[in-house]
Image (cartoon, rainbow, N blue to C red):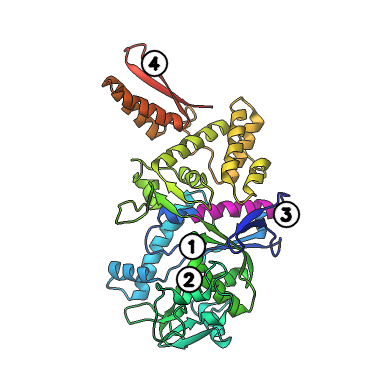
Amino acid sequence: MTSGTPLNLYNTLTRTKEPFVPLDAENVRMYVCGPTVYDFAHIGNARPVIVFDLLFRLLRHTYGANHVTYVRNITDVDDKINARAARDFPALPLNEAIRRVTEKTGQQYAADVKALGTLEPTYQPRATDFVLPRPDGKPDMVSLIERLIANGHAYAANGEVLFDVKSMPDYGQLSGRNLEDNLAGARIAVDAHKKNPADFVLWKQSSAEEPGWESPWGRGRPGWHIECSAMSAAYLGEVFDIHGGGLDLIFPHHENEIAQSRCAHGTHEMARVWMHNGFLQVEGQKMSKSLGNFVTINDLLETGTMGGHAWHGDVLRLAMLMTHYREPIDFSVKRLEEAETKLRDWQRAARGAELANDDAPDASVIAELADDLNFHRASVVLDAIAKKANRDDARASHCLAATLSFLGFSLDSLLTSDDGWEEPPHIATAIENRLAALNARDFAKADTIRNELSEQGISLMDYKDPETGERKTKWESKR
């Protein structure tokens, strides 16, 4: 262990923040549910990627980079993928068409999350590689389902295999839903072949138009939940330290993962700590294609969908981290602008520092992050270090640079080589609009623009061009 800072993490399973004690400090193990790669990843997908990358970095710092195993899966079999494959490659056999779709979208996902400053997980397994028994003997979905049937926790009916929720008395601990509530829930589909309405699918039949694998129950494909049970066991074992994902996965996905894994392996738990990031909205509304506010990571990086210009991945990363990971986040142009301004200030303060591979991040920042990833308090510490660096404190500048690097930010992404920084496009546009308002004697609009920039930490100073006499404005970050 390289750091003596104790970690405290909020555990969804116990509803408490508690000291993190790994099963094995020599091999700390974490699994996070990854994307279903039927299309480009949206910004909601970016949040768990960034949150758990930060945790991965913290765990590596605490226990050593070689003592942490991080698995993030890729779901490449799904009804939405099937539909996309049939649409885009109608002349190909479906299984081949699906591979074409998921290889393209998977590569785009990898490029997008790399642009967000994330480290590659230790392993990134694809679901389709874990359906059938493997030559290397790692757990697979068919074998897990067979074990569940043999243990009396699953049954075959009408071409499907279903998990029998009544076979697990404490089903529902993670979500807080008891079995009676689930059985009475009107939203649960009731099929005649189910023993109980809450029983969920482990294996389902495939038609000739759907992807399928030959199994003991006929040609079919796995249910969604069994995928993660197989892939987590394959790389992390039957019980591991941390399982992460979005809040929307608690029920039914994570609840059913727990049921499958515990009942297949005969363990009293699947993961010791369950962590979930909060929901994301866009400009105050739920993200939806019907509302026209569905934004992909690639849109923000390349096309200027929000704010009229492309944003650097470092800005997206900071914008996500500025809200505590368990809280809901309103992703907006204003938030991106605030993140861009703050990050540029940090980069300017750290300018010129030369780092070595073993340069450590600031201990106070680590201490704040160790309290359930409290990035807000960590950023307050960074602001204080930046103030010292701006007073020509070389040690502070070096410390700031090392800490930014640890956090996954580059040191010059918003800076240019000539004078150390470039004007953010949104500030230039605001200044131009304000000058136009002043020239039109619309002083109320001009004051509104000035106040909005002030709230972002930007001070404006008006002056006359000495040669032309034209009104000009310059700006600086408030310290």
Q: Is residue 71 magenta-colored? A: no
Identify the residue at horizontal 59%, vertical 50% (top origin): 373
**Magenta part of the protein: which range?**
48-63
Mark carried by residue 1: 3
User: Crowding near pointer 1: few (<14 within 10 Å), some, many (20+)?
Assistant: many
Looking at the image, is mark 4 or mark 3 earlier in the sequence?
Answer: 3
Q: Vertically, is 431 above or below 269?
A: above
Q: Which residue is mark 1?
A: 34
Q: Vertically, is 119 above or below 140?
A: above
Q: Vertically, is 108 above or below 134?
A: above
Q: Is residue 57 magenta-colored? A: yes
- Mark 4–mark 3 distance (CA, rounded to whole Å): 57 Å
Q: Position of residue 104 (x, y in %)?
A: 38, 62
Q: Nearer the viewer, residue 50 or 438?
A: 438
Rendering quarter of residue 83: bottom left
Looking at the image, is mark 1 or mark 4 earlier in the sequence?
Answer: 1
Q: Which residue is mark 4?
A: 463
Q: Amino acid at mark 4?
A: Tyr
Identify the residue at horizontal 71%, vertical 60% (top origin): 25
Looking at the image, is mark 2 or mark 4 earlier in the sequence?
Answer: 2
Looking at the image, is mark 2 or mark 1 earlier in the sequence?
Answer: 1
User: Crowding near pointer 4: few (<14 within 10 Å), some, many (20+)?
Assistant: few
